[in-house]
Image: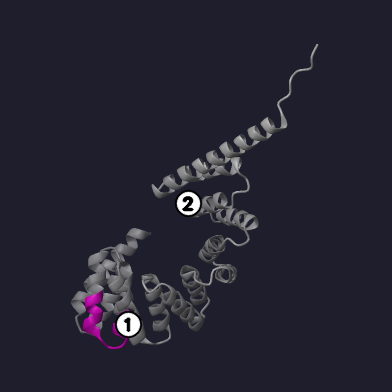
């Protein structure tokens, strides 16, 4: 009896390559589906799809990075950091993975760990505006106002339309007593948009500090109009009204502060 025919080496190689291609395509499909679910506000569904992509392609740094982002969105800080760790182990030049890991660390009170990650991201990509911005936030959290302002300066030099950097630089300047500089930064942030209640509260606070009570009151009015549930807006408006001698309106705003604070308990 003749021995059974065996496929040729060429055929085996062809089949192996085809299987690998199909596997890569399938992993990519799961990545795409996970991205779609994440964009639609379904991070749990995205996590499941990224997990399938990782099972098919365990060497995909992007899949771990994307799953880390989705886990971060669900509040799973430990899971997010673990995924960013995997992404970085697979691709040590993944600047965004360092930056995102830094964000999670900073949000959990590890400012030093966050700064170290932002340092790595910036070393890998010196034009990474968001990494400078986020490092500035971590430095401000540690009380390093000058270091924070320097990072905001660099972020804005790279991206002059980064409105949050103007806002945060304004708060750092205000903390240093530079009310005029703070107001100028808040003006730029408002010009870039979108306007927010907290931004008007910030500018109103700086205006009040420099004695512009009318301007401050106008900003607090705008803040309340944008967010009628803003405790800080009512509190600051009451403070300004009291300084202007309008005790009746100040008392009414005090009552709103108490009411809103009671709702949040």
Q: Is residue 178 left or right of residue 237?
A: right
Q: Earlier in the sequence, mark 2 or mark 1?
A: 2
- Find disc 2 in the rendering and name its residue: 74
Q: Tell how many labels.
A: 2
- In-front residue for pair 160/115: 160
Q: Residue at x 55, y 63 (%)?
A: 95
- Find disc 1 in the rendering and name its residue: 184
Magenta segment includes 199: no
- Residue sitting farthest toward the right: 1
- In-front residue for pair 236/195: 195
Quarter of the figure that contains the N terminus:
top right
- The answer to whether any part of residue 259 appears in the image is yes
Q: Is residue 196 left or right of residue 60?
A: left
- Residue sitting farthest toward the top: 1
Label 2 environment density (alpha carbons within 10 Å; few <14, some 14–19, many ≥20): some
- The stretch in magenta equals 205-219
Q: Look at the numbered disc 1 and give the secondary structure of its residue.
A: helix
Q: Is residue 8 left or right of residue 103?
A: right
């Amino acid at each position: 009896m003749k021995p059974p025919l065996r496929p040729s080496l060429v055929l085996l190689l062809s089949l192996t390559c085809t299987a690998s291609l199909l596997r890569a395509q399938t992993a990519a499909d799961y990545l795409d589906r996970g991205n779609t679910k994440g964009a639609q506000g379904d991070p749990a569904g995205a996590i499941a799809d990224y997990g399938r992509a990782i099972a098919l392609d365990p060497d995909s740094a992007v899949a771990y990075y994307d799953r880390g982002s989705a886990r971060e969105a669900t509040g799973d800080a430990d899971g997010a950091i673990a995924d960013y760790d995997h992404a970085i182990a697979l691709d040590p030049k993944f600047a965004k993975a360092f930056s995102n890991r830094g964000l999670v660390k900073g949000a959990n009170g590890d400012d030093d760990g966050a700064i170290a990650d932002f340092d790595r991201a910036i070393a890998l990509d010196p034009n990474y505006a968001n990494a400078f911005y986020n490092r500035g936030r971590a430095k401000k959290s540690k009380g390093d106002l000058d270091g924070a302002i320097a990072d905001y300066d660099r972020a804005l030099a790279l991206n002059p339309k980064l409105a949050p950097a103007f806002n945060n630089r304004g708060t750092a300047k205000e903390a240093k007593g530079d009310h005029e500089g703070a107001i100028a930064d808040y003006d730029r942030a408002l010009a870039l948009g979108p306007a927010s209640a907290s931004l008007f509260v910030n500018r109103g606070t700086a205006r009040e500090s420099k004695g512009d009570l009318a301007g401050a009151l106008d900003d607090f009015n705008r803040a309340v109009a944008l967010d009628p549930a803003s405790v800080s807006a009512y509190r600051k408006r009451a403070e300004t009204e009291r300084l202007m001698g309008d005790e009746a309106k100040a008392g009414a705003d005090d009552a709103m502060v108490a009411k809103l604070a009671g709702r949040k308990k």
